[in-house]
Amino acid sequence: MPPPRVRFTMRQMMVIVAILAAVIGTVEGLRRRRESFNRRAELFAQKGSAAIMDEQNYRMSHRTNRRDSPFYYDNRTSAAYDRLVEHYDEMRTKYERAAARPWWFVEPDRPEPDWPKGVPKR
C-alpha cells in the first residue's frame, strides 16, 4: 500500500513559512537578549572589581588622620566603596538571572548610591 499523497495549497505553504519565521525570529531575539544581559553582567563584574581595587589603592596611599595632609584617609570612603561594590554585585546578579531567563521582564536599573560630599572618588 503506497503512502497517502499529501497535497499543500499555496495558502497552507504561506502559513507554514510565516509560523516558521515567527519561531526562528523569536528564538534569535531571545539569543541576542541573553548575550546583551551577559555583557551587562560582565560589565558590572568589572566595575565591582575596579571599585574594590580603587578602595584598596586609596587606603594604601592615604594613611594619615591629619585633615590638612594630602595623605588624609576619610573613614567614610570605605563605607561608600562598600555600598558601591554591593550595588555592582546586585546588578551583576540581576543580569546573570536575566540572561538565564531572557523571556522574563527585567526591572530598570537602580541609580548608583550617593557618594558622600567632600570625599574624593578615584
Image: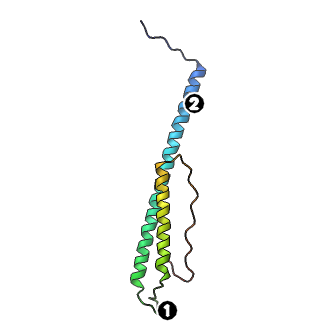
Q: Nearer the viewer, mark 1 or mark 2?
A: 1
Q: Residue at x 58, y 21 (%)?
A: 12
Q: Secondary structure at mark 1?
A: loop
Residue 103: image location, x then y, percent: 53, 46
What residue is shown with label 2? 18
For residue 122, above or below residue 34: below
Q: For mark 1, does the 10 Å Cα neighbourhood hold few (<14), some (14 to 19), or many (20 or more) residues?
A: few
Question: Residue 25: x percent and y percent?
Answer: 53, 38
- Mark 2 packing: few (<14 Cα in 10 Å), some, or many (20+)? few
The amino acid pointed to by label 2 is Ala
| Kind of residue indicated by mark 1 | Arg
Q: Quadrant of the N terminus?
A: top left
Q: Position of residue 46 (x, y in %)?
A: 43, 64
Residue at horizontal 49 percent and vertical 11 percent from the top? 5
Residue pictured at 58% horizontal, 17% vertical: 9
**Mark-to-mark CA distance, 1 and 2:** 71 Å
- Label 2's element? helix
Give the answer, above or below, for where 104 lies relative to 23. below
Residue annotated with mark 1: 67
Where is residue 8, by image quadrant? Answer: top right
- Mark number, residue 84: none
Residue lying at the far left of the rendered structure: 60
Determine if residue 2 is in view.
Answer: yes
Q: Position of residue 121 (x, y in %)?
A: 50, 78
Can you see residue 35? no
The front one of 102 and 35 is 102
Q: Nearer the viewer, residue 92 or 42?
A: 92
